Image: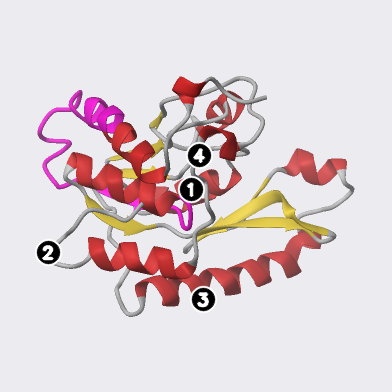
Amino acid sequence: MWPPEHERFADRTAAGRLLGTVVAAHLRQFPATVTAQTPLVLALPRGGVPVGYAVAEAIGADFDLVISRKIGLPWQADHGVGAIAENGPPVFDRSELACVGLTVSDMTPAVQRERAELRRRQERYRGTRPAPDVTGRVVVIVDDGLATGVTARAAARALRAGKPAHLVFAAPVCAAESVDLLTSDVDAVLDIHSPREFHALGLYYTNFAPLTDAHVAEICSLAWSTDKVPAPV
């Protein structure tokens, strides 16, 4: 089922600009003591990167990445039953594992494989640039959408260990059921649309073309340069 036309975004950058107004309104609720440091937007590659860059531009935040990888079933890698994020432990949907007759130990090879891919992406996107320090900062995790929410939960739990002052997850569209599950891991979940009947994230975008590592690296280069220019669509 297609969402109504007024609920669709032209592309990820357009969605990020709209989401930026939602995030800005949320941050205005806090006293200056909480927002004394520049907010930090951490985008989830790949799809969350153009959205996150647009949000960072809209709210005047620093931009960086938090890399999280979905962990799929041994026989169906695209069926996520868990996720792992930088410097964080794997997070699993244990009820889903039980339904297919697997234990956390059974997923060890998949965890090792995804951790290796996570390290590859760290090197590809950041190079020698260190991961940002989140201690005492307002941190906004951004993705292009929240479907199952497992990668977002892994990212949030990894970042909690760094003791941010306020941790937010933001995405243009979030499945309402997944919002309910994520609220225990972050201080707030922000979105523009949160449908109860969520069929596919791509239905909410006119242009939902897949992104490559080169796209991500280009946006990061723009964000981390001294002379910023508008993000590419």
Residue 145's label in the rendered image is: 4
Q: What is the distance, in whole Å, between disc 4 and disc 3 at their CAs?
A: 23 Å
Q: What is the distance, in whole Å, between disc 3 and disc 2 at their CAs?
A: 28 Å
Write the residue at 75% across / 70% down. 109
Write the residue at 13% across / 28% down. 31
Q: Nearer the viewer, mark 1 or mark 2?
A: 2
Please state which amino acid type lies under the numbered disc 4: Gly
Q: Disc 1 or 3, which lies upstream in sequence?
A: 3
Secondary structure category for the residue under label 3: helix
**43 with respect to 200 (left or right):** left
Image location (x, y in percent) of residue 141: 39, 45
Q: Quadrant of residue 197?
A: top right
Q: Nearer the viewer, mark 2 or mark 4?
A: 2
Q: What is the distance, in whole Å, between disc 2 and disc 4 at their CAs?
A: 29 Å
As drawn, 183 above or below 136 = above
Q: Nearer the viewer, mark 4 or mark 3?
A: 4
As drawn, 136 above or below 169 = below
State the residue position of label 1.
157
Q: Which residues are magenta?
A: 21-47
State the residue position of label 3.
120
Please state which amino acid type lies under the numbered disc 2: Asp
